[in-house]
Image (cartoon, helix red, strand yellow):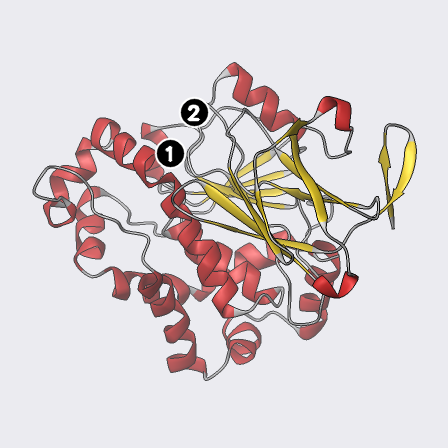
Amino acid sequence: MSISISNNLVKQGPLVQAKYSVSNRITMSWNTAAHVEVEGIYLSNQLEFDESQSARLEAHIDLEAASVTRTQSPGRNYYHLKFNDGSVSTIYDRMINTDGVINFRDMGGYLTEDGRTTRWGALLRSADLHELSEQDLHIAGTLDIDWICDLRSDFEVAKRPSPAMGKAINTNIPFMAEANPEDMEKIGLDLNAGYKAMMMNTEKCSLILHELLQEGRYTSLFHCAAGKDRTGVVCALILLTLGVPRDVVIEDYELTNLAVDELMKRFLADSKDYMDHMPELMGKTGEIPEMMKANFIQASLEAIDENYGSFDRYLHEGLGVTEEERTVLKNKYLV
């Protein structure tokens, strides 16, 4: 496979994997069996690498990995690793930067158990879309979104309606139909139980997977209010269906911690209705404590094991998704 660089074809470099840290660093690693070394790491807003249009980053580079400080410019960012044999590997920054949408990111690039990877730009997730700016709408337009799955309740949709986003069909699938402040309080008292209940909402889980099977839905965006609980469970379901290992699914869930500061600001400023009903989530200083802990999403996975014994049985018997339909989903969203 080759990629275009300033109208010249160059060799594709090694497969590169990336991990994020809350200190705003990104660490990239690659297969050293290729016997190549990284000469430099570049940042651009274009998938195709053009050295003259890219910024060379200060990086700590070893034989097997490199780390850089993430630069959060608007829209999509790409990191280009230039190797000493002339090859180039390009990875997407998983986070998509906008003014008004928090916790907006891509679920592409994850290795699956059959050796494929989730397709970049096909499965997106975020917090609600209510505060999209004009610039944000332009960025969203470049993502070519076909379907938006809004997991919020009628109460939340009325309070913070979503704007139209290009050609995207917006479908409201209330994942917790009773998500008014009083019921959110009950869930807040035991998030582990809440996560188990969401994964066992087999009717809605089945509906969402079958919606993904529909023709013409190649890029989908899933969101709730904060893009962490309901969205976290639904996205875990999708990644597991595609064959992403559980430990990687948990890592994806925990990436919401990168957006925790902005989420706290939003909830404190705009969600007083919820905060008044959930005092147990408030810290002594009036701040929301860290909520994106691995044990929450692990609880939803435990519910699968407790009720069905395996994910395959849950998928087939609980959700009514056949092996043929699962294969269609994999062929559609894996490369």
Residue at position x 92%, y 33% in the image: 8
Residue 247 appears at what percent x and percent y?
Answer: 48, 67
Residue situated furthest top in the rendering? 134
Residue beneath label 2, please? 100
Quick one: label 1 or label 2, which is nearer the N terminus? Answer: 2
Type of the residue with mark 1? Val
Determine crowd level at label 2: few under 14, some 14-19, many 20+ residues with C-alpha closer than 10 A.
Answer: some
Residue at position x 76%, y 28% in the image: 51
Viewer-nearest residue: 190 or 81: 81
Residue situated furthest right in the rendering? 8
**Quarter of the picture holding the C terminus:** bottom right
Q: Is residue 311 visible?
A: yes
State which quadrant residue 22 falls in. top left
Residue 118 appears at what percent x and percent y?
Answer: 66, 56
Type of the residue with mark 2? Gly
Residue 121 appears at what percent x and percent y?
Answer: 66, 42
* Left or right of 156 in this view: 24: right
Residue beneath label 1, please? 157
